[in-house]
Amino acid sequence: MSVTHGGAGAASFRARSRPSRAYLRFLFGHSRIGHSPIGRSPIGRSPIGRSFFRLSAAASVAGMLVVTAVGPVSAHHPDLTAGAAERVGVLTGAGLRPGDVVTDHGISVVVPPRGEMIWAELKFDDGTSQTLSVETDRTGAVRLLQWGDEAAGGPDPSVPSSTTSAGTQTSTSGVEPAQPDGTSGIKGECSDGSYNRFSFRMPHLKWRYASGTTPSKFRNRTNGTRQVINALKRANRNITDARNLCGRSDRIGAQGTYLGTTSRRPNVSSGGSCTGGDGRSVIGWGSLPSNSIAMACVRGISGGVAYEGDIRINWNKAYETKSRYCSGELLIEAAMTHEFGHLYGMAHVSSYSSPNLTMQPIVSYCSMAHTTLGLGDMRGLETKY
Ligand SMILES: [Zn+2]
């Protein structure tokens, strides 16, 4: 049995042993194992990954796309060979079923229940990222929506090979005249109308902060935890309030509400897996694969509304809360404005052709550039909400 993996080569299948129930509980949290009624999640929608371009560091996590079946053991244990470039599109017929664990170059997700989708992204400090998105439609058919090795190259994220119910949707607007910014061919923040969207929507993100995970650097500082929370709140509002330097009014209908601190943790593991699925959106800190800065997981109804968005920030990376404290660090507000953009359903634009937009993936040290939305960032969000 084999399956063609995006034309990049055949994949073979191999059997894996069945995991323990404890492992299943770890993976699934409170949700039921194996299947799940469409109405389980209150609001759902599907996130889909963003693709990327490729510098070098992500190669350190390069591996294979491995699918481990945790459902009834049968012949359906595809092992999709690595080496294939990142794909945005639809791969069906891979023998996947809800409950299977799909591992793609260092990150993994559990194939969601019928009618649901999951999107995951591990973001690295060089602007690369690894993304994986899987959906199970109402008939039970499972589709990989985004998979493969971003570091190995792939389609320009601004040109997805297809648009699916949970896939990326592209729109590049050239309506407004370009404002010369001194860089040939590159538009400024207020004139670059490019955007890519996931088809899922997050009309009202209600999130909590896992205060117990705050790095000691901030905990030991007077009001340090509060400064972290405030930076996260600003990051959220930068998206929902359309913070910009272009004089554009807020036409973004999405809402974000900070509900306070929680003892819960983001449903993201240190190894780069989306875990649980408790319907609670939590942002917090923890260890993550080396050179990564954060990982986000979004769950939702396939082609519908997302009901959970979690972000785990790598506490082994140097972050700061404010520009005036910053020296060779990442600013929480800047990096998280971009991550909140993903939670609200925005995908990446190319950092080559649209380097001035918030949804381009390279976050520079001590730079606040990501904290103000560009024209394309706003247009993309406006069309969704
Ligand atoms: Zn990103």
Image (cartoon, grey):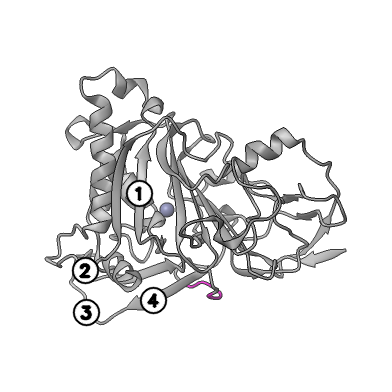
Gap between marks 4 and 1 measured at Cα: 28 Å
* Amino acid marked by disc 1: Lys
* Amino acid marked by disc 4: Ser
- Element type at mark 3: loop
Residue 12's quadrant in the figure?
Answer: bottom right
Residue 96's quadrant in the figure?
Answer: bottom right
- Element type at mark 4: strand
Residue 107 can be seen in this image:
yes
Question: Could you tell me which residue is drawn at 52 percent across and 56 percent down?
Answer: 41
Residue 86 can be seen in this image:
no
Looking at the rendered image, the disc whose residue lies closer to the viewer, 4 or 1, is 1
Gap between marks 2 and 1 measured at Cα: 20 Å
Quadrant assignment for the N terminus: bottom right
Q: How crowded is mark 2: few (under 14 residues within 10 Å), some or many (20 or more)?
A: some
Question: Could you tell me which residue is drawn at 63 percent across and 68 percent down?
Answer: 137
Whether the residues at callouts 3 and 1 have beta carbons within 8 Å, the answer is no
Q: Which of marks 2 and 1 is nearer the N terminus?
A: 1
Q: Residues within 10 Å of mark 1 (few under 14, many from 20)?
A: some
Gap between marks 2 and 3 measured at Cα: 17 Å
* Amino acid marked by disc 2: Arg
* Amino acid marked by disc 3: Glu
